[in-house]
Image: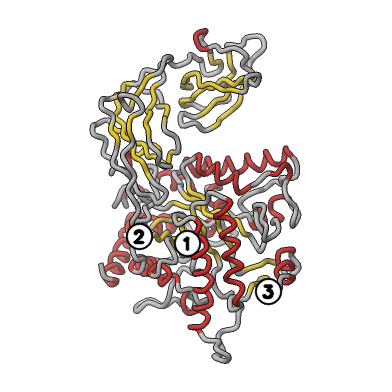
């Protein structure tokens, strides 16, 4: 599709949405395309100055637990909206949120620069584990050029190492023209990739700072030289990251307008000519796998530039950066309808989306979180890295027994399979064979186990499981040979008390754990002393749950059965 056709389509889609707004029901009036099976749905989580997370300090065991609970709450909300990518600020301002051998701790974790949290707690490792439990990717967001206040510990450390630091009203910055800078930033990214199971490295502010004087064309200070400076840094990082783990995605967040278009001006501020980011060329040269352009604009400053990013994507991932923070009246004067319009049109063009920032999405500014849940009607798998060649396709999983579906001795129905793949996708349908191309059939993406307990149901259901490699390539499905009519024995309850039948009462139980049907922790309940078979569940919301019993004496826990809370 040529660029002029894409531009025309973009304008047509935007106009259609404007008409739909008259009825104030965009999800019905602009339903041009259902949620796709593969799509980037991302959120930036800012740790700088504790903006998004954390809000408490990890200076004690209690503080660590509160900090963890905060993140769990954030991720649970994102998971409920079918978000699949978290961009977590990992290198903040020449300081980190993990134990680095290169740079000091950022103050956001403990409240003090350079101070490690208590009990060898590693916030980055915890965040990665929690994201992966929910089938989400975690990308380490790296602030590359800014180094914070001039007197900050991180900035002083760089000066002591001999780096040239420039000071402006907005803070201090490394000099992109300095030769040793590229290898230094690359070493930080390599440290993260070597130590952690991150899914991506996202380079933020990989450009010349706004306050930097424009090229004077003396001593080789030209636009071409400055673009080469930034590309040299990107190249060094790419080389280090891909040498360690070639599946880790390289991305950056360029200025939202790449350059002037033939019919639309960037109004003097763009990625290529103003801050010297050749982001589109980096895609073509294989230095980037994804882009998250910061398209915090409206109208003709947004839609034509979406078309330009997609026209020059080289068939790689582009996720539009949404100015969600402008929904807060203290930040801007945007309306929810404007942001919804951007999301619909961008999806129709094949773009993913990324909210800046997490707080504004989860605070549900003007109902944007509620809309996100409507917009993402089903889960989505991340696009495969199809540009990585000579990768063997994952094999079809094998059933663990004679059938994919099995029922154990207490009536729990599960899927069990065999495979050495790192991830699996689980599909369900009322018809057979299960159509795995239909996103509505996807019930669990990027699952890491080889067995899956099914939620109680009396309807006949068919299942399919596919294997997926670290590049996102998916195998053909293992289909269930016959439908499952799941007749789990529910534990009785009246909405207040849950009765544990005698057949399920184990010995030496200290407490019970309530989980969702996909294994997410909900609540811990101590075993009552007087009536050990009656558990108080009055605080639980309506829904289906799993009960586990834990014995501290034997240090084991067992899944008991399902129960359903259904109050009128």
> Which circle's residue, 3 or 1, is located before the other in the chain?
3
Q: Position of residue 80 (x, y in %)?
A: 47, 40
Is residue 32 found left or right of 531 in the rendered image?
A: left
Picture quarter with the N terminus: bottom left
Proximity of marks 3 and 2: CB atoms separated by less than 8 Å: no
> Which circle's residue, 3 or 2, is located before the other in the chain?
3
- How far, Cα to Cα, is label 1 from label 2? 14 Å
Residue furthest to the bottom in view is 218
382 up-or-down from 76: above or below: below
Q: Quadrant of residue 89?
A: bottom right
**Residue drawn 43% across and 39% down?**
447
**Residue drawn 51% across and 83% down?**
225
> Which mark, residue 163?
3
What residue is disc 1 on?
Answer: 251
User: Callout 2: 10 Å neighbours few (<14), some, many (20+)?
Assistant: few
Proximity of marks 3 and 1: CB atoms separated by less than 8 Å: no
> Which circle's residue, 1 or 2, is located before the other in the chain?
1
What residue is disc 2 on?
Answer: 387
Is residue 209 found left or right of 503 in the rendered image?
A: right
The residue tagged with tag 1: helix, strand or loop?
Answer: strand
Q: Position of residue 2 (x, y in %)?
A: 26, 70
The residue tagged with tag 2: helix, strand or loop?
Answer: loop
Between circles 3 and 1, the one closer to the viewer is 3
Q: Can you see residue 364? A: yes
Q: Position of residue 343 (x, y in %)?
A: 40, 56
> Which mark, residue 82?
none
332 up-or-down from 381: above or below: below
90 up-or-down from 415: above or below: below
- How far, Cα to Cα, is label 3 from label 1? 25 Å
- How far, Cα to Cα, is label 3 from label 2? 37 Å
């Amino acid at each position: 599709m040529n660029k002029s056709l894409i531009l025309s389509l973009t304008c047509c889609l935007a106009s259609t949405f404007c008409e739909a707004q008259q009825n104030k029901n965009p999800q019905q009036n602009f339903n041009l395309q259902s949620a796709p099976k593969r799509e980037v749905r991302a959120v930036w989580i800012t740790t700088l100055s504790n903006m998004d997370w954390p809000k408490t300090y990890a200076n004690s065991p209690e503080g660590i637990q509160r900090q963890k609970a905060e993140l769990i709450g954030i991720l649970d909300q994102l998971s409920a909206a079918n978000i699949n990518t978290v961009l977590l600020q990992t290198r903040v301002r020449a300081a980190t949120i993990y134990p680095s051998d290169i740079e000091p701790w950022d103050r956001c974790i403990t409240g003090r620069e350079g101070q490690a949290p208590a009990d060898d707690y590693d916030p980055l490792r915890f965040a990665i584990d929690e994201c992966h439990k929910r089938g989400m990717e975690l990308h380490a967001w790296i602030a590359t050029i800014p180094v914070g206040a001039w007197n900050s510990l991180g900035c002083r450390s760089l000066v002591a190492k001999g780096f040239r630091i420039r000071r402006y009203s907005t803070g201090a910055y490394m000099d992109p023209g300095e030769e040793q800078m590229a290898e230094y930033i690359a070493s930080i990214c390599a440290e993260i990739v070597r130590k952690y199971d991150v899914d991506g490295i996202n380079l933020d502010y990989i450009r010349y700072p706004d306050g930097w004087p424009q090229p004077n064309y003396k001593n080789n200070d030209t636009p071409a030289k400055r673009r080469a400076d930034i590309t040299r840094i990107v190249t060094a990082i790419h080389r280090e990251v891909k040498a360690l783990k070639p599946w880790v995605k390289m991305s950056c967040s360029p200025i939202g307008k790449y350059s002037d278009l033939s019919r639309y001006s960037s109004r003097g501020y763009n990625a290529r000519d103003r801050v010297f980011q050749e982001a589109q060329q980096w895609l073509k040269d294989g230095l980037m796998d994804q882009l998250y352009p910061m398209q915090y604009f409206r109208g003709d400053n947004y839609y034509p530039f979406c078309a330009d990013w997609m026209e020059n994507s080289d068939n790689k991932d582009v996720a539009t950066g949404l100015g969600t923070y402008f929904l807060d009246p203290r930040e801007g004067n945007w309306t929810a309808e404007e942001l919804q319009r951007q999301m619909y049109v961008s999806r129709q063009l094949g773009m993913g989306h990324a909210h800046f920032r997490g707080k504004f999405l989860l605070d549900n500014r003007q109902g944007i979180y509620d809309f996100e849940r409507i917009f993402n009607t089903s889960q989505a798998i991340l696009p495969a890295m199809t540009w990585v060649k000579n990768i063997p396709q994952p094999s079809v999983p094998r059933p663990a027994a004679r059938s994919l579906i099995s029922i154990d001795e207490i009536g729990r129905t599960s899927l069990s399979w065999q495979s050495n793949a790192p991830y699996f996708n689980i599909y369900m349908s009322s018809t057979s064979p299960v159509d795995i191309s239909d996103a509505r059939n996807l019930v669990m993406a990027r699952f890491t186990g080889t067995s899956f307990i099914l939620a109680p149901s009396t309807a006949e259901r068919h299942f399919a499981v596919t294997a997926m490699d670290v590049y996102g390539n998916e195998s053909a499905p293992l289909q269930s040979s016959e439908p499952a009519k799941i007749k789990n024995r529910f534990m009785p309850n009246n909405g207040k008390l849950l009765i544990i039948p005698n057949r399920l009462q184990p010995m030496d139980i200290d407490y019970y754990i309530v989980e969702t049907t996909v294994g997410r922790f909900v609540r811990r309940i101590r075993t009552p002393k007087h009536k050990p078979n009656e558990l108080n569940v009055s605080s639980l919301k309506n829904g289906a749950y799993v009960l586990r019993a834990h014995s501290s004496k034997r240090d084991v826990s067992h899944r008991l059965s399902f129960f359903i809370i259904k109050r009128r």
